[in-house]
Amino acid sequence: MPARLARRETGVALISVLLIIVVLAAVGAFMLVAVDRNTELRVGFQKNVAGLNAAEAGLNAGAAQVQ
């Protein structure tokens, strides 16, 4: 391989590795945001179900007192 061509290709590996690192960091950040959002939705759903169960228990208690 000519010396001039080898000199021009010396930074290609470094740039490729840096590009891969940036892509992996972006994917990791996206996954972190997605997991955090999913956790928030799950907690909200659990609170909603707990409220529904409490309301149903209150209705059942009121119905039992009426009878």
Image (cartoon, grey):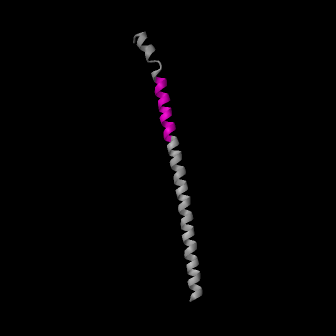
Question: For the point 52% across and 57% down, which residue is it?
Answer: 41
- Residue 31's place in the image compared with 7, above or below, is below
Q: Which residues are magenta?
A: 13-27
- Residue depicted at 52% across the width and 52% down the height: 37
Q: Is residue 22 magenta?
A: yes
Quarter occupied by the C terminus: bottom right
Q: Quadrant of residue 1?
A: top left
Q: Give the vertical position of 2 relative to 22 (above or below).
A: above
Q: Count numbered badges in the picture.
A: 0
Residue 42 in percent (x, y) is at: 53, 58
Q: Which residue is situated farthest in the top direction here?
A: 3
The residue depicted at 50 percent of the width and 29 percent of the height is 18
Above or below, 59 relative to 25 = below
Image coordinates for residue 52, horizontal then vertical, percent: 54, 70
Q: Residue at x 55, y 60 (%)?
A: 44
x, y (%) of residue 65?
60, 86
Nearest the viewer among 65 and 8 is 65
**Residue 15: % across, % down:** 47, 25
| Residue sticking out furthest to the left | 1
Outermost residue to the bottom: 67
Q: Can residue 42 be found in the magenta stretch?
A: no
Nearest the viewer among 35 and 48 is 48
Q: Which secondary structure is most common in the magenta stretch?
A: helix
With respect to residue 63, does 39 lie above or below? Answer: above
